[in-house]
Image (cartoon, rainbow, N blue to C red):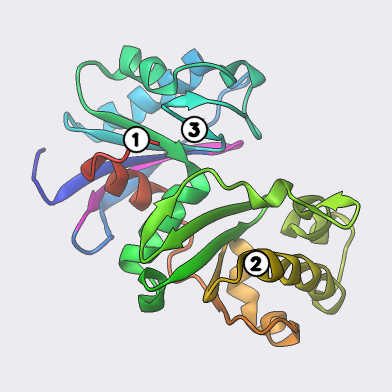
Amino acid sequence: MSNEHIGFGVDIGGSGIKGALVNLDSGDFVGERVKIKTPFPSTPEAVAAVVAEIVSQKEWDGPVGICMPSVIKDQIALSAANIDKSWIGTNARDVFAKALGDREISVLNDADAAGIAEVEHGIAEASEGPVIFLTIGTGIGSAFFIDGKLFPNTELGHMLVGKKEAEHQASSAVKDREELSFKKWSKRIDKVLLEYEKLFNPKLFIVGGGISRSHEKWVPRLTLETPVKSAKLRNTAGIVGAAMAVAGHVTP
């Protein structure tokens, strides 16, 4: 299958690797996505083999965009969250090229990919002025945009807010682990967002991740002045953004 309006994206997570054909005009999947359990250990070679299997199952021979929980600079993985630490220092694109063959490949951070998808196919205001996109889940991922253009690898979840990293006190994983009510957890995310607001002064925060589905339970409790909106794209955002990135020749 090959079409200039169809792309292919893969989203690598700590528990599963998901891939799908994407309609680049609408941001919708073309057919069903494929999901395969992330191998253990999740070494570069093992993960690349799973990505190749997903691409093969969908019979796709075109470019492939791949997002993963890593800082990606010049296609080098500089960090590894929820995947094997042997990724650090590897040329991620070269790793995938060995498994996928001679085709265009673009690798980028998973929050950046999700943000790219949201800017294009989500909330209209996301493409206007300075906007911070956050994914709140196991950690806190971030993507910065100015007039829809990405500033990659911001990693706000690791910023110290008080004496702890932001994601160590206000991720949804922490909420679940400490069995926090939305009332108690909203005070924590409010503290984090107030710090981000003070330092970066965005026009808008867009929040994705599973907890965004319950936005009505915590967003009204926030005290910051910057509007906070729930992302429109959720589970599909990483795949869609990865497909868009390679179609647009984005290579952080």
Residue occupying the point 83% across, 56% down: 169
Q: Is residue 243 above or below residue 27?
A: above
Q: What stretch is highlighted in magenta?
A: 13-24
Q: Which amino acid does the dot numbered 2 rest on?
A: Ile
x and y percent of residue 217 in the render?
71, 82
Mark drawn on residue 211: 2
Q: Which of 106 and 58 is in front in this view?
A: 106
Residue 1 is inside the magenta segment: no
Label pair 2/3, CB-CB below 8 angstroms: no
Q: Which of marks 1 and 2 is in front?
A: 1
Residue at which label 3 appears: 72
10 Å neighbourhood of mark 2: few (<14), some, or many (≥20)? Answer: some
3 relative position to 230: left or right: left
Quarter where residue 185 is shown: bottom right
Q: Distance between the residues labelled 1 and 3?
A: 9 Å
- How far, Cα to Cα, is label 1 from label 2? 29 Å
**Disc 1 + disc 3, Cβ < 8 Å:** no
Residue under numbered circle 1? 251
Q: Label 3 is placed on what type of residue?
A: Ile
First along the sequence among labels 2 and 3: 3
**Please, what secondary structure does the residue beneath circle 2 have?**
helix
**Tag 1's secondary structure?**
loop
Viewer-nearest residue: 29 or 122? 122
Indicate left or right for 183 with 104 as reference: right
Q: Are marks 1 and 2 in contact (CB under 8 Å)?
A: no
Image height of 182 relative to 176, above or below: below
Residue 176 place in picture, x, y as percent: 81, 59
The amino acid marked with disc number 1 is Thr
Residue 66 is drawn in which quadrant?
top left
